[in-house]
Image: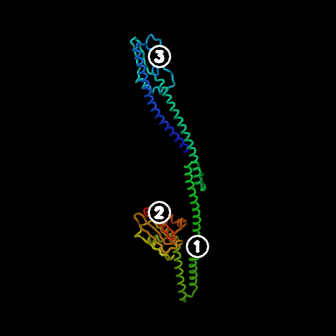
Amino acid sequence: MNALSFRARLYAGVCLLFAVVLISMLLVLLQQAEKDLVRELHASRSMVLQLFDSLSRSATAPDAMRLDGLRHLRIIDLNPASDATPPAAAPGAVPAWLARWLAPAVTERFPPLTLSFADGQQWRITPDAHDELEEIWESVQLLLLVFAMALLLSLLTIHWALSRGLGAYHRLLDALQSVAGGQLRTRLGPSQQPEINRLAERFNGMAAALQRAEQRNQELTERLLSVQERERMQLAHALHDDLGQYLTGIRAQAFLLQRCDHSDSRTLTRLSSQLLSNCDGLQQGFRRLVRDLHPVVLERLGLEQALAQLTEQWQQQQGVECRLELDGQLPGLRLEARAHLYRLLQEALNNVARHARARCVWVRLSQEQDLLLVSVQDDGSGMATPVQWGIGMHSMRERARCLGSPLQVNSAAGEGVVLGLRIPLRAVA
């Protein structure tokens, strides 16, 4: 419906344009025809007046038969003795509107003229523009014919071009519908039109990009499920092997305390020490689990102390120097923004530990006007190009997007990696 309405509007616009040009040219043609008609009538009347003047001097009576063949004028014999009948206006095919259009130029400039001779003869000269009007009408008809043929050719050309263009348009719509339905292997074939080929190339590139994105999403989903299952296994092992052993030891030691001789102070002291040690180990294990599941320290200590604790614990666990550089007091951020930033830096440090083989890592945070600048830099082996984005990099990029900043990754082989963020404070404060 939209395509048909567009075609109808286009046809109407072309017809309107032709009509405006045609009317303009008709007006110009009629104005020029009026001037030509005035010149013809003036020349004919001047010639007749000279003829009558010469006849009056030679005392020769005018002959009505000889004067009957003059163009653009009618000469009527007014003599009572004459039996000549005034010539009637010749019928013609000139339309009435054209005659009315040019009538003022004839009647106002060339009123009827009566000539009298010495012998009493009288002749009346009136304009007769019939022949000239027929010539003007023929010119108008020719102009209308030329415009009709030009309009017809234009409409046929537009119809042909639109048919080809709308065919490509419908093929594109069908292809888009297929892509919307999940058929990402849909492609547009080549055409004889260069413009359609460029459009097809862009569409095929878009479809290929969507197909690659879908494949990456499927791979990431599989890896995410694998990571989720691995985390559940680690949590189960931690609960069973670590915390479960502590609980088993506490249960056994409590049973021994119940069964032992309370007069044996050495046994009581040893069992009590073991019980306290197991309770400390159980508490540390729970703290590690809670810290891995959710950074509660952000709610209690604030961002600066939480990051200091994160880098210190990471340095102790990995044996790699980690320097935290804070440029003064950090601005206050929402809890959700603090959690995203904390997890992003945690994932960045984990990536350094897994891949970088670095000796030192620098974590820098500073405020510059309304921006919070964050960077993580290491002196490790760098990243291969092109960069293969894994689960960790994708999670950091998504957290950076939640913070309102793109994740900038700069790396070269043997020169380490620099991750950068430019977080607008108005979006996270």
Q: Establish if 221 lies above or below 358.
A: above
Q: Which residue is mark 2?
A: 405
Q: Residues within 10 Å of mark 2 (few under 14, many from 20)?
A: some
Picture colour scheme = rainbow
Which residue is at the front of the view, 246 or 203? Answer: 203
Dot 2 or dot 1, earlier in sequence: 1
Sequence-wise, the earlier of marks 3 and 1 is 3
Question: Dividing the image into 4 quarters, which one contains the N terminus?
Answer: top right
Q: Residues within 10 Å of mark 1 (few under 14, many from 20)?
A: some
Q: Amino acid at mark 1?
A: Ala
Inter-mark Cα distance, 3 to 1 = 131 Å
Label 3 sits on residue: 66
The residue lying toward the viewer, choosing from 209 and 194, is: 194
Closer to the camera in the image, 248 or 390: 390
Mark 2 secondary-structure assignment: loop
What kind of residue is marked 3? Arg
At x 48%, y 35%, the residue is 22
Residue found 47% across the figure and 16% down from its top? 66
Q: Say if 203 sits above or below 87 in the image.
A: below
Is residue 172 shown left or right of residue 130?
A: right
Of labels 2 and 1, the one closer to you: 2
Residue 236 numbered tag: 1
Q: CA distance from mark 2 to mark 1?
A: 36 Å
Q: Nearer the viewer, mark 3 or mark 1?
A: 3
Q: Quadrant of residue 232?
A: bottom right
Q: Secondary structure at mark 1?
A: helix
